[in-house]
């Protein structure tokens, strides 16, 4: 659900600070990760892909091939309130997007494509949070 996704995003987004430098993602492009879900935020910058890789690595959410680690991702999402209702769907959506962009060799380029695909599909499925929902829970993390 969008509610659960707001918790996941609020927590995951904290790692952006630690990844800002090494990913080279300018503050002007994205100052806070919650804006990922904004209607008018375009998920297109290669550096955002690099940042998502760096952030995911903080929680061991990726395998060595930079694709999602299904077990760890399930466990991570399940650690949030009501997480079990989202984890299966979320892993499914991400994996489905990974399959569509499997031919892109550059990890940052590929992950930003996968992330854009995931945002689009999450909206379609009605599990994309409003930024205000993320703001409402961000202080918990
Ligand atoms: C990685 C879980 C974080 C969830 C926070 C919300 C949205 C972020 C989108 C990132 C999409 C995951 C892309 C990783 C795929 C690697 O092949």
Image (cartoon, rainbow, N blue to C red):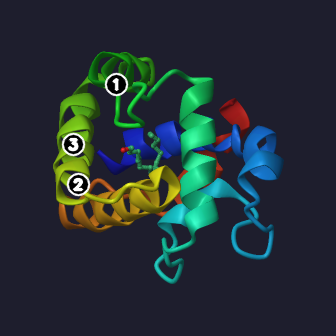
Image quadrant occupied by the C terminus: top right
Helix, strand or loop at mark 3: helix
Task: Judge left or right: residue 79 versus residue 91.
Answer: right
Q: How many marks?
A: 3
Instruction: Say whether disc 1 or disc 3 marks the residue closer to the N-terminus.
Output: 1
Name the residue tied to disc 3. Answer: 95
The residue at the point 77 percent across, 47 percent down is 22
Relative height, residue 141 to residue 25 (above, below): above
Residue position marked by numbered label 1 in the rendering: 69
**Does 130 sit left or right of 121 as displayed?**
right
The outermost residue toward the front is 105
Does label 2 point to a residue whose CB lies under 8 Å from ligand 1?
yes
- Left or right position of 60 against 89: right
Ligand 1 within 8 Å of disc 1? The answer is no
Q: Read off the residue under disc 2.
A: 97
Tell me the residue at 52%/55% (across/down): 108
- Quick one: label 3, few (<14), some, or many (20+) residues within 10 Å? some
Residue 85 percent across, percent down from the top left? 23, 30
């Amino acid at each position: 659900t969008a509610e659960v996704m707001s918790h996941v995003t609020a927590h995951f987004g904290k790692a952006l600070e630690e990844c800002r430098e090494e990913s080279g993602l300018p503050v002007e492009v994205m100052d806070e990760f919650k804006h990922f879900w904004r209607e008018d935020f375009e998920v297109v910058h290669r550096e955002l892909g690099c940042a998502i890789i760096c952030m995911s690595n903080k929680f061991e959410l990726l395998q060595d091939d930079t694709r999602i680690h299904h077990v760890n991702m399930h466990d991570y999402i399940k650690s949030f309130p009501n997480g079990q209702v989202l984890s299966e769907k979320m892993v499914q959506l991400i994996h489905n997007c990974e399959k569509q962009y499997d031919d892109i060799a550059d990890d940052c380029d590929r992950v930003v494509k996968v992330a854009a695909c995931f945002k689009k599909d999450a909206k379609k499925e009605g599990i994309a949070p409003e930024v205000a929902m993320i703001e409402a829970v961000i202080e918990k993390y």
